[in-house]
Amino acid sequence: MIRLENVCKNFGDLQVLKNVNLEVKEGEKLVIIGPSGSGKSTTVRCMNFLEEPTSGHVYIDGQKLTHANKTKIIRESISMVFQQFNLYPHMTVLKNLTIAPMKLHHKSKKEAEDLAYHYLDVVGLRDKAHVYPTTLSGGQQQRIAIARALCAQTKIILFDEPTSALDPETIQEVLDVMIKLAKENITMVVVTHEMGFARQVADRVVFMADGQIIEEGTPDHFFENPSNERVKQFLGKIIR
């Protein structure tokens, strides 16, 4: 469903990604972890050309992303949930969820609203349909952002550290929604520091450091018997 082939990304003289090769299968739940500055978020942002690779290629569902086709392919195939919620503060929750289906996917108002209410039920926030995002907690806003991504009905959802901007008390409510989604046939790529989530949900865990993938495997392998010394040091610091 996603393939990165020798992807490099430079910001000026700084090389952030160094020949990253990665495949994600349809329906797979891939979790990317690693220290800050390791290239995790840049890797995910290259998957939908929010960051265009300096060199290398990105394939989505067998199609190579290019300037000419990226908008069409990404609109049809990929949604993204960011660290910050990026909701429109001047629009109600319902309007935030229906604007893209109506304008981009040409659904009728009723179709878009039916879809929005369905996914508000999924994230447990139907009662917030007519309020404005600024009246909600951070955890509620992030759940709305997830519902918005689901309203696009894409095959792939990318999550870039979706709990990093939240208070500790609200992190679990967002993770619970993501755990529920992981039971569906949606391809999920998640950058996170939440090791419990990675253990519970991931089909495969990828560890990045210094712009490279240095280890990958099942959660059992990764957390119980990692082979790379850098991974062991990382896990030793965050898992007590």
Image (cartoon, grey):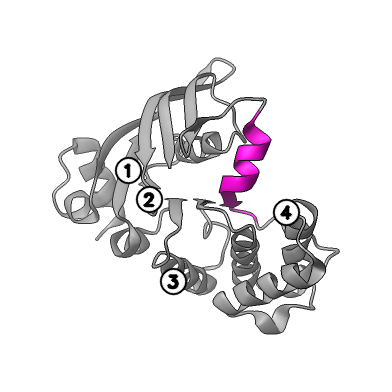
Instruction: Tell me how far mark 2 sits from mark 3, CA to CA.
Output: 15 Å
Kind of element beneath mark 1: strand
Q: In the rendered structure, which disc, 1 or 4, sits on the residue that comes first in sequence?
A: 4
Kind of element beneath mark 3: helix
How dense is the environment of label 1, judged by Cα within 10 Å: few (below 14), some, or many (20 and up)?
many
Image vertical order of residue 58 relative to residue 105, above or below: above
In the rendered image, the quadrant that contains the N terminus is top left
Q: Which residues are magenta?
A: 69-84
Residue at x-position 29% and y-position 54%: 203
Report the residue that reaches farthest toward the top: 13
- The quarter of the displayed image where residue 198 is located: bottom left
Residue at x-position 78% and y-position 59%: 102
Q: Which residue is mark 2?
A: 31
Q: Which residue is mark 4?
A: 105
Q: Position of residue 56 (x, y in %)?
A: 47, 20
Could you tell me the amino acid type at mark 4?
His
Residue at x-position 26% and y-position 50%: 235
Kind of element beneath mark 2: strand
Q: Which residue is mark 1?
A: 206
Q: Position of residue 148 (x, y in %)?
A: 65, 62
- The quarter of the displayed image where residue 17 is located: top left
Report the residue that reaches farthest toward the bottom: 127
Instruction: Tell me how far mark 3 sits from mark 1, CA to CA.
Output: 21 Å
Marks 2 and 1: CB-CB under 8 Å? Answer: yes
Badge nearest the viewer, 1 or 4 = 4
- The answer to whether residue 92 shows anywhere in this view is no
Q: Which residue is mark 3?
A: 180
Q: What's the mark number on residue 149? A: none
Image vertical order of residue 95 relative to residue 55, above or below: below
Q: Is residue 34 left or right of residue 110?
A: left
Kind of element beneath mark 4: loop
